[in-house]
Image (cartoon, rainbow, N blue to C red):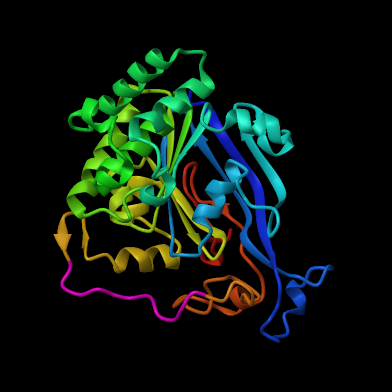
Amino acid sequence: MRKKLLEIKNLTTSFFIDDDSGTNLSRNEHPEGKIKLKAVDDISFSVYEGEILGIAGESGSGKTVTAYSILRLIPEPPGKIESGEIIFCGKDLLKLSREEIAGYRGSEISMIFQEPSSSLNPLLKAGLQVSEVIRTHFNLSKDESYKKALELLRETGIPEPEKRMNEYPYSLSGGMQQRILIAIALACNPKLLIADEPTTSLDATIQMQILQLLKNIKSKRTNASIILISHNLAMLSEICDKIIIMYAGKICEIADKKTMFTAPKHPYTVGLLNSLPMIDGRIKERLNAIGGAVPDMLNLPQGCRFCTRCPDKFEKCESSEPELIGISEEHFVSCYLYEK
């Protein structure tokens, strides 16, 4: 029987900003005169031990804010985790003190950030940045931490690791910088690895190498779980066991990989798949774009957030927001088309 490693329950994370537009946004207004933007609005999902979960969606859908909320990296102010639970190994991370949650970062949950060039310290050698993480969390000597860092560089597939240990990040390629970040994330053998768009700035060949590296990590560390965040559905189809589709701060659909690509239910998911140039190894002759634009997060539609672009909408969609409902044991969709 599968064991839950992480369970997100009704998570809402908002940002409070000044309204300089002069627009009437009273329904989103905060008592302090700030305008509230719900970047993540009442979402729930689970991650099981040994599972690779993909989170997909357009820019601004709430993918990265979800990841930052798990590690409580949301800057306060202007952000705030307003409600919900983040249950990790039986403990609600939102109830921990700042000192306690700091103990989870790196050792229990690690994150690979989006831009390796801005995440690494340009003034420190690559090997030192890995070994310092090890020394921070373990009672090891300088030589012992150096040897462990060298092993991690080998595990992440960095060529000539002894040489790279003594090089600065600026002298490394984007792919090698990303591998250094992955080595740092793996330094304390975390139970959960969160990768936020880890291949965005890399060319196609290096992207596939990084994905293969994540697969290898998963196979070697059998109980470790990975959350992989991306706007690239084709990439997620290569590695993930389960996929979540987000839109404007809400979850549209959750399904295992096979179901998501062969029997999608939400009109937004269907639209995303129809816009892919290739699926199941076949190149499409014609691509179908989703009409319209993502709604303004400060002035969202009254009902379903996708209703302004949905080809299947009806009256109820414009007046109330649908809940996430189960249409099978592993398949959930937020759409009135499937309301019982």
Q: Can I make out residue 9 in this image?
A: yes
* Quadrant where the C terminus is found in the figure: bottom right
In the rendered view, tell whether residue 260 sits above or below residue 52. below
Depth check, front residue: 61 or 117: 117
Tell me the chief SS of the magenta region. Answer: loop
The residue positioned 57% from the left and 76% from the top of the image is 296
- Describe residue 58's horizontal placement relative to residue 147 as left or right: right
Residue 79 picture quarter: bottom right
Query: For this view, does 253 lie left or right of residue 240?
Result: right
User: What's the residue at 31%, 50% (across, down)?
Assistant: 199
Q: Nearer the viewer, residue 323 or 93?
A: 93
Can residue 88 be seen in the rendering of this structure? Answer: no
Q: Nearer the viewer, residue 125 or 37?
A: 125
Q: Kindly indicate the quadrant of the structure image that contains residue 224.
A: top left
Rendered residue at 34%/35% (across/down)? 126
Q: Position of residue 92 (x, y in %)?
A: 68, 34
Residue 167 lies in quadrant: top left
Q: Which residues are magenta?
A: 284-294
Question: Residue 48: x and y, percent?
Answer: 49, 32
In the depicted structure, whether residue 76 falls above or below residue 211: below
Looking at the image, which residue sits at the far right?
Answer: 31
